[in-house]
Image (tube, grey):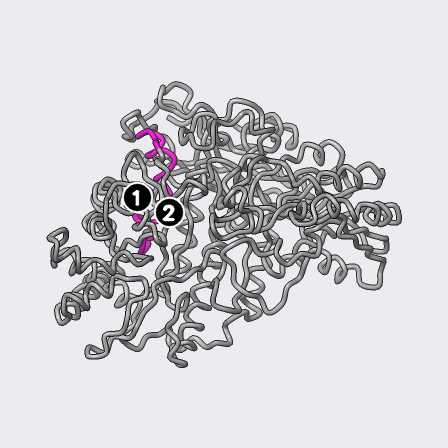
Amino acid sequence: MNKMINREKARKMAEDLVSQMTIEERASQLRYDAPAIERLGIPAYNWWGEALHGVARQGVATSFPQAIGMAAAFDEALVRKAGDVAATEGRAKYNANVAENDRDIYKGLTFWSPNVNIFRDPRWGRGQETFGEDPYLTSRMGVAYVEGLQGDGDLLKAAACAKHFAVHSGPEELRHEFNAVVSKKDMAETYLPAFRACVQEAGVEAVMGAYNRTNGEPCCGSKTLMQDILRGEWGFQGHYVSDCWAIRDFHEHHMVTGTMEESAAMALQAGCDINCGVTYQYLLNALKQGLVTEAEITEAAVRAFTTRYMLGLFEKTEYDSIPYEKVECEEHLAVAEQLTRESVVLLKNDGVLPLSTGKTIGVIGPNANSREALIGNYHGTSSRYITVLEGIQDKVGHNGRVLFSEGSHLFKDRVEGLARENDRISEAVTVAKHSDVVVLCVGLNETLEGEEGDTGNSYASGDKVDLNLPASQRKLMETVLATGKPVVVCLMSGSAIDLTLAQEKAAAVLQLWYPGARGGKAVADLLFGDYSPSGKLPVTFYQSLEELPDFEDYSMKGRTYRYIEGEALYPFGYGLTYGDVRVESASVVSQDPVSRDVVICAKMKNAGTVSTDDVVQIYVKDPASAYAVPNHSLCAFQRVSLEAGESREIEIKVPGEAFLVVDEEGKFQKGSDKCLLYVGTGQPDARTEALSGKKSVEVPVK
């Protein structure tokens, strides 16, 4: 209620201020680089800011794991805390920048995060920016991060932005001209829930449109998305911003308009308030041509200034006292370290882990000592980086020996070609032969997967062409595994990679994602057993691309764990620990007759000898409705800590929405009279059952 009252007050103040502006001044404020209006005491403001996993692109800040790794933690409270850290450091930097009269790009308080698109296809380079493939997990992580960024005070600590609205997940090469054709059912069931949750639950202050068209309409000029759904059905009251230079695509690539003026008019009339780009510089021409009205320009300006008032940018606030010393402080670094520990997913362990000191450990691979492999894309700068090699070296100290070989280059050098592809293989073999155990660090970085135009991956515009490691790394892995030494494969990537060889022949396999600037310390802590791994996969690791539809096909059929028709290499929600956590029993405690919310009591036990966190996951299956997803859907989860041998009962609420199905018209309706809830530490599949020693518990719900 406080924020609603604050918005009403902020809007009235915005209306009053905008009424004092000329039409030229109002139009100028709809640019992302809004100029100062000195006669009204309005300073310049640049709307473009980034905080995907910590404050980005404006110098030093605490570096969290990439967003996909944050999702792997399955920890709403910690992700919310990470958002708060980013907002606190954003305020500290804003205060310092204003004191130096620096109001340049990336230095405001409007952060274009989080990315709540669905990671529907592992080829998408920007999938690393998302919270994975599942709409429920993405909703929970998105809401938590938005709440952390915006805070719970009378004013916004920072303004979050849910992006990219909507139905955006590759291919990057075609995004400026691509038309994503999607059914009403897939739209409502998969692509929109996280945006709706960010709007209706978290009150996200901004929404960013996508580059592509959705069902024929450019997303930054779509009346269906902006007016009918966002502001109509969901009641969104914040501001809408275009992706950068997306409005220019209307006439240059989508070919739905003919001029800059027509494109600007189309976007403004649909409800796009802020233009990241230059097209809104033609708004006054559009006004003269009768394509837009003064009232439409005024309304967009009022929305923009409402946000600025809600941030307290024209008055003294409680946030003005946040000192620069908060940036990268010990408390914030501790949050990042914990989030990295929780994000790492143990995929295989034949008993080689945890490692012990006092031995010779060979660390091999192009990502072992790589800073680039720590940070992912949309990153900040760290005052210190700790690679996996450095983390292991610090852990071993003088109690053992650490040998190192890069082993191969990240990928084949395009200039020198094959001559450099395998030039370090022999050194890697030598290191392996002289080691008791090998830690092999392979994978990608933001130059091989990322955003179109933002990476060195020019041949695929940031997307992957397949699920394979680069050829040089495949050769390295084959060679090292052939030495006969126990090998721990550590994959650093933002997406699924084919790990078939590692699963067959390595002693252990870990998915590290991009673990953050100092992530090597947390990784070493896990490798040596100071903590137990506890992350879970937020995406499916497929056997191959052959089982997936075409990259340009946006139908969910055959995609993600809810629709997959075969068996995954590693399923969504999968992850091992050093303990042995089991769900011994589960029962319904209560069910609300109106909301249909269900409270489940689950009895947990760690039957192992190592204390650990684990994630209890609940999946719902509607066995009868023709509109139910083919498999099952995540509907609740909770991270739990258990000492060795400890038993505990926990209660988890399953929201009533979990028992609804979506028909072909995109309408939510009541499903079967009797649904099944599966309670376990993974999906209700044979692999999870084999790990726990008993089947997932089935709970009938009326």
The type of residue carrying mark 1 is Cys
- Could you say which disc has been placed on residue 164 in the image? 2
Which mark lies nearer to you, 1 or 2? 1
Q: Is residue 520 left or right of residue 660?
A: right
Classed neighbour count for the residue bearing mark 2: other residues with Cα under 10 Å, few (<14), some (14–19), many (≥20): many
Q: Confirm whether residue 267 shows in the render.
A: yes
Which residue is depicted at the point 23% across and 45% down? 258
Label 1: which secondary element: helix
The type of residue carrying mark 2 is His
Label 2: which secondary element: strand
Q: Confirm whether residue 201 shows in the render.
A: no
Classed neighbour count for the residue bearing mark 1: other residues with Cα under 10 Å, few (<14), some (14–19), many (≥20): many
Q: Which residues are magenta?
A: 181-206
Q: Specify the principal SS of the magenta part.
A: helix
Sequence-first disc among 1 and 2: 2
Q: Which residue is mark 1?
A: 219
In terms of depth relative to the viewer, which is nearer, 396 or 183?
183
Q: Residue furthest front?
A: 415
Circles 1, 2 touching at the beta carbon (< 8 Å): yes
